[in-house]
Image (cartoon, helix red, strand yellow):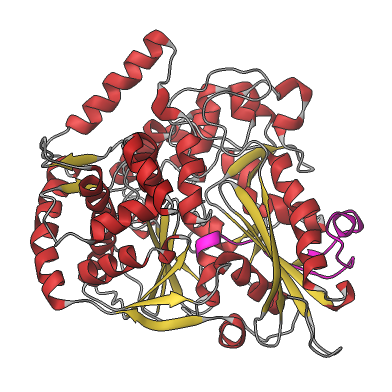
Amino acid sequence: MPDTAGPADTHVVGVDFGTLSGRAVVVRVSDGAELASAVHPYEHAVVERTLPATGEQLPPDWALQMPGDWVQVLKTAVPEALAASGVDPASVVGIGTDFTACTVLPTTADGTPLCDLPQFADRRHAHPKLWKHHAAQPHADRINALAEERGETWLSRYGGKISSEWEFAKALQLLEEDPEVYAATERWVEAADWIIWQLCGTYLRNACTAGYKGIYQDGHYPSRDYLAALNPAFETFVEDKLEHPIGQLGERAGGLTAEAAAWTGLPAGIAVAVGNVDAHVTAPAAQATEPGQMLAVMGTSTCHVMPSDRLADVPGMCGVVEGGIVPGLYGYEAGQSAVGDIFGWFVEYGVPASYRDAAEAKGIGLHEHLTELAAAQEVGEHGLVALDWHGGNRSVLVDAELSGVVLGQTLATRPEDTYRALLEATAFGTRTIIEAFESAGVPVTEFVVAGGLPKNTFLMQVYADVCRRPLSVIDSQQGPALGSAIYAAVAAGAHPDVTTAARAMGKVRRNVYVPDEQRADAYDALYAEYLALHDHFGRGGNDVLHRLRALRRAAVQRTGHPGAAEGHDVETTSAALTEEQSA
């Protein structure tokens, strides 16, 4: 609705760049009121099947994006939100952004994406690699094995494993699979920083992605001799392509350029906040900035972030970074590579037409119909247990080569049975993450949820029951964008620090879902079975999932056909459920 506040009010804009779209929100600085928002879908969405310039078939586990799609969000969503809000553009004092991570791209020294150069438009490695690009797993395996062999001290800060989703694994893949594009890469840039570069003309690496995705710990990246041991040509990767000044969260990266002002309709010169990551930026929006407050941003994937005053090695975590969420505290990150994507995949490929017809007859969506049927069951009635690894395992196993498992199906199994088992599997996966923290001496004092999935009230109750703890819920439909606006307010000097801004502008409803003891007891029995399968298939008890992945990869290489499962139709379907809140 249009802003009716007095002329002294000031405003900020937050922009959330997700997996399929970007959204902008106009926020009042004094109280966090969200005055208007707008969404712009990316024209190319997720590039998983074919390269747009040539139609070249992409190999399995590839996921790319087009940087021009991100700029269109600035040109479309921001002016639309501004117009809908009714505020005077002159009252806007800052803009902040967040991005999926690790989404990374090769550029020239002035920030031009290599894929935008004619000579590289047909090269898949010249394009941005989205967070869910998992084709660098063999390179991540080598990074981890060598680091463990050499006793690299930074490895424990990441739970003992560097992910294939992160900067170094993707860069090593680029070097070894397309040396010419690697040689032309003058900057290896997080998309979170690239978009800030476009807004203010200044390139800063934000402390969040540098720490979590770029192995930047205690002021240092991995050493030259370590990188040379990976590949002699990789020795100078940091100094040649990665190293750059670090911007702290909430700081001003620069002023909005005249060109970006023309794109957005905002005043030139206003504060542009240092870039950030979608999950981490949501913490102040949900008032989850105190030690032990774990925030789960639940969408196509789930990212778990938590500030803490304790530094510990937590197995399987994505990282711990000082000041990685809010200044003055250690910020922990964990995650699940696929959550809403799993539900979307099942609805797209695992449900017969009769269920679609029934949902249409009731005037509801298919997800809602399946949820109603699943909710009518008692815990364990379906006789199933599933592993939530359809997109690999981010935490606590850090293994993108793992895949989904559903155990216990019979001829009597119905779609709602499997659907419920998949919902429960994602809750079990979250419980393993919580237990890993607490076993390492890092307590979780509150569990807060945000993103698109909390609108499914049955799913939220399952999480409360499985995890045996109350769930608080962000009181905003635009968590990351609101968080980006909060950081913009700090960068503009409208609030003195992130915690103060969060208290004034963040929104949360405490203890909305409370565990039912009887259901929680029943889930304990199912969780024990989940853990047994988790360790059997994920910790070396049986390597069949890796062998199946290798067989599939060999077959694809022989035939050249990646198979139907590599399409992005599933992502489009799941986005309808998750409202595009990815991590």
Q: In the rendered view, does 339 fall on the left or right side of 417?
A: right
Residue 441, how many percent across, how many down? 24, 74
Which residue is pictured at 10% across the width and 66% down the height? 522
Which quadrant is home to the N terminus? bottom right
Say which of 225 and 45 sits in front: 45
**Span colored in magenta:** 254-279
Say which of 490 and 455 sits in front: 455
Q: In the rendered view, does 415 fall on the left or right side of 201?
A: left
Vertical order, 551 against 449 (above or below): above
Residue 27, how many percent across, how many down? 70, 76
Q: Is residue 419 magenta?
A: no
Q: Residue furthest top?
A: 558
Vertical order, 129 against 183 (above or below): below
Count of numbered circles on the image: 0
Q: Does residue 583 appear in the picture of this structure?
A: no
Vertical order, 368 against 173 (above or below): below
Residue 520, how many percent across, how many down? 15, 71
Residue 560, how many percent across, how many down? 44, 12
Q: Is residue 265 magenta?
A: yes
Which residue is pictured at 58% across the width and 67% down the height? 478
Vertical order, 360 against 78 (above or below): above
Say which of 582 and 350 sits in front: 350
Q: Does residue 121 appear in the picture of this structure?
A: yes
Q: Quadrant of residue 462?
A: bottom left
Q: In the rendered view, does 147 fall on the left or right side of 131?
A: left
Which residue is pictured at 23% across the width and 45% down the height? 418
Which residue is pictured at 11% across the width and 57% down the height? 380
